[in-house]
Image (cartoon, rainbow, N blue to C red):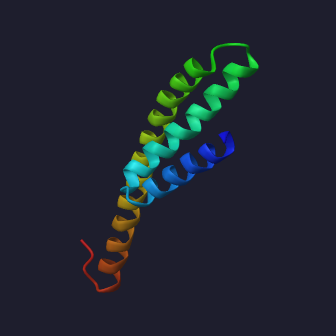
């Protein structure tokens, strides 16, 4: 029964991600990875896995946000480079 519930939860999480914006995907996946790492780390250290999952989830969400900002900046930079190349090819140098 526990395996079925775990698989169902994973399927619901994966399905929910398909309807998210890229920013939401980065935040949710960061939170999930952080929560899993926090729970595993707490269990290894004989601490409360729920507290570890909560702290890891918060840290993972912050990491997902930072990753999202990094990706946005990369896209802006790529757009600027393409725009500059286009201007240069057509003789619109300033």
Determine the residue positioned at 63% across, 26% down.
Answer: 39
Measuring from the top left, give residue 16's x and y in whole percent.
Answer: 43, 54
Identity of the residue furthest to the bottom in this view? 90
Determine the residue positioned at 54% across, 46% down.
Answer: 9
Measuring from the top left, give residue 2's x and y in whole percent.
Answer: 66, 39
Number of numbered discs: 0
Q: Quadrant of residue 89?
A: bottom left
Q: Could one spot residue 25 in this view of the protein? A: yes
Most foreground residue, 61 or 81? 61
Most foreground residue, 78 or 28? 28
Measuring from the top left, give residue 3's x and y in whole percent.
Answer: 68, 44
Q: Could one spot residue 67 in this view of the protein? A: no
Identity of the residue furthest to the top in this view? 47
Note whether 31 is above or below 84 in the view shown: above
Compared across the picture, whether 36 is left or right of 72 comes to: right
Q: Quadrant of the N terminus?
A: top right
Q: Quadrant of the C terminus?
A: bottom left
Q: Quadrant of residue 85?
A: bottom left
Note whether 52 is above or below 73 in the view shown: above
Identity of the residue furthest to the right in this view? 44
Determine the residue positioned at 32% across, 73% down.
Answer: 83
Identity of the residue furthest to the front in this view? 1
Compared across the picture, whether 23 is left or right of 14 comes to: left
């Amino acid at each position: 029964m526990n395996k079925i519930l775990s698989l169902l939860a994973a399927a619901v999480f994966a399905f929910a991600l398909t309807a998210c914006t890229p920013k939401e995907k980065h935040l949710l996946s960061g939170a999930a990875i952080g929560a899993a790492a926090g729970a595993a780390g707490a269990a290894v250290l004989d601490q409360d896995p729920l507290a570890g999952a909560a702290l890891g989830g918060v840290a993972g969400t912050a990491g997902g946000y930072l990753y999202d900002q990094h990706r946005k900046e990369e896209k802006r930079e790529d757009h600027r480079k393409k725009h500059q190349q286009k201007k240069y090819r057509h003789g619109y140098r300033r």
